[in-house]
Image: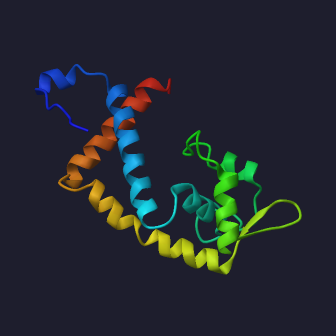
Amino acid sequence: MTIQHDSDAALAAQPAAYWTRLAYEALISFTRARQAELGFTQPQFWLLRNLSKNDLSPDGHGMTVPELQQAMSSYIKPEDDLRAEAEVLLERGWLTRDAGERLWITEEGEAARLRLKEHAPAIRALIHRDIDDADYVTTVKVLQRLIENTSGA
């Protein structure tokens, strides 16, 4: 994608929602492409994270696919098929399923989660290339203010 670099005055007049949508789509696409090159999908990583007692799972108990969809509702994309992604992880031996349809992370799955997690700093470094930490922090603070200004809080 080619970005036209307008003057500061022109940029100040542009809608934030346009740029945040473009940024979201570009960042997610980039991250997912890097993960696919490494042999896994973002939803697979999230499944492992949400089932790991050493990560996002509050108690390490198994969860059904609908429970996982609910737990991931703030960041899952509509086209993400957690049921199909879970089947891949079941075939790899990274998850098991009990009689109640609850998915559980295996020891192999926990080891895989840790291996997959190791790739996050390199992906982040590519995304943050040529962006000063202070500029990034300012951007996040501006986005937080935009959210606060529009959330009715």
Q: Is residue 137 left or right of residue 81?
A: left
Q: Which residue extends farthest left?
A: 7
Residue sitting at x 48%, y 70%: 116
Q: Residue furthest right?
A: 99
Residue 42 in the image, given as x and y percentages of width and height: 51, 56
Q: Is residue 84 above or below residue 96?
A: above
State the residue in front, 141 or 89.
Answer: 89
Q: Is residue 29 left or right of residue 99?
A: left
Please state the total of marks drawn on the protein image. Answer: 0
Tell me the colour scheme of the image: rainbow
Res 56 → quadrant: bottom right
Residue in the picture at 70% in, 61% down: 87
Image quadrant in which you'd find residue 95: bottom right
Q: Position of residue 135 (x, y in %)?
A: 21, 47
In the displayed structure image, the side of residue 117 where residue 104 appears, left or right? right
Residue 50 screen position, x and y as percent:
63, 60
Can you give x and y, in whole percent of width and height, for residue 72 in the image? 62, 49
Please identify the quadrant where the N terminus is shown: top left
Q: Is residue 104 visible?
A: yes
Asked if residue 78 is positioned above or below residue 8 in the image, the reply reads below
* 70 left or right of 56 in image: right
**Is residue 69 or residue 53 the one in the foreground?**
69
- Residue located 41% across and 63% down the image: 37
Q: In percent of the image, x 37 and y 30: which residue is there? A: 146
Asked whether the viewer can see residue 94, the reply is no
